[in-house]
Image (cartoon, helix red, strand yellow):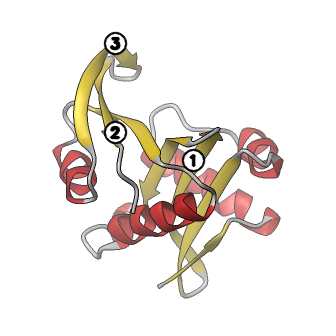
Amino acid sequence: MEIKKMMPEDVKQVAYLEKEVFSVPWSEKSLEESRKRPEYVFLVAWCGQEIAGYIGMYQVMVEGDITNVAVHPKYRKQGIGNALVNALLREALLLGISEITLEVRVSNQTAIHLYEKNGFVSEGTRKNYYEKPREDALIMWNRSIQ
């Protein structure tokens, strides 16, 4: 596995991954437009010739907001999600980001455990944040990026 910054030629595979993983996926156009903007960071995990996962973050001053973390179902339980989070935390440090937030479905215990393992703690909920199915989001923060 190799983690790299998302390139223009990666967008089509990432959009496909979005459709595989999320009930309300980002479009190829949204991904491409965001990828071009300097306040966004997107990293992809390559396994051979295929993108196995990706992570995105939006930066505002010294804060980061993780927009999406996705690992293709056939690549799960191989440490790819953890590697992506760690790579993003290293990138955040280089960008001068000191704290990062994210939302995660309250039922997604696998993701919650992954984030907790990487220094994120729950600080609240957003009611009915997700659609298809409607569900609350847990708001998590890592306020000590290192």
Query: Could you say which is closer to the camera, residue 38 or residue 109?
Result: 38
Q: Tag 3's secondary structure?
A: strand
Q: Nearer the viewer, mark 2 or mark 3?
A: 2
Secondary structure under tag 1 reads: strand
| Image vertical order of residue 105 relative to residue 39, above or below | above
Give the amino acid at mark 1.
Answer: Met
Asked where in the image residue 96 lies, by quadrant, the reply is: bottom right
Q: Residue at (69%, 47%) from the top-left corner?
A: 40
Residue 1, given in percent of the width and then of the height, sits at 47, 85
Classify residue 135 as left or right of residue 98.
Answer: left
Q: Position of residue 69 (x, y in %)?
A: 45, 51
Label for residue 141? 2
Circle 3: residue type: Asn
**Residue 71, x across and y down, in percent:** 41, 61
How far apart in space, not on screen, are marks 1 and 3 (Cα)?
22 Å
Left or right: 65 in relation to 117: right
Q: Are marks 2 and 1 in contact (CB under 8 Å)?
A: no
Residue type at the position of mark 2: Trp
Residue that carries the numbered disc 1 in the rendered image = 57
Closer to the eye: label 2 or 1: 2
Q: CA distance from mark 2 to mark 1?
A: 13 Å
Question: Of label 2 and label 3, which has the lower sequence position?
Answer: 3
Relative to 141, say whether 118 is above or below: below
- First of labels 1, 3 by sequence position: 1
Image mark for residue 128: 3
Give the crowd class for mark 1: few <14, some 14-19, many >=20 residues within 10 Å: many
Residue 93 placement (x, y as % from top left): 53, 61
Which tag, 2 or 1, sits closer to the chain's start? Answer: 1
- Seen at 60% across and 65% down, the residue is 94
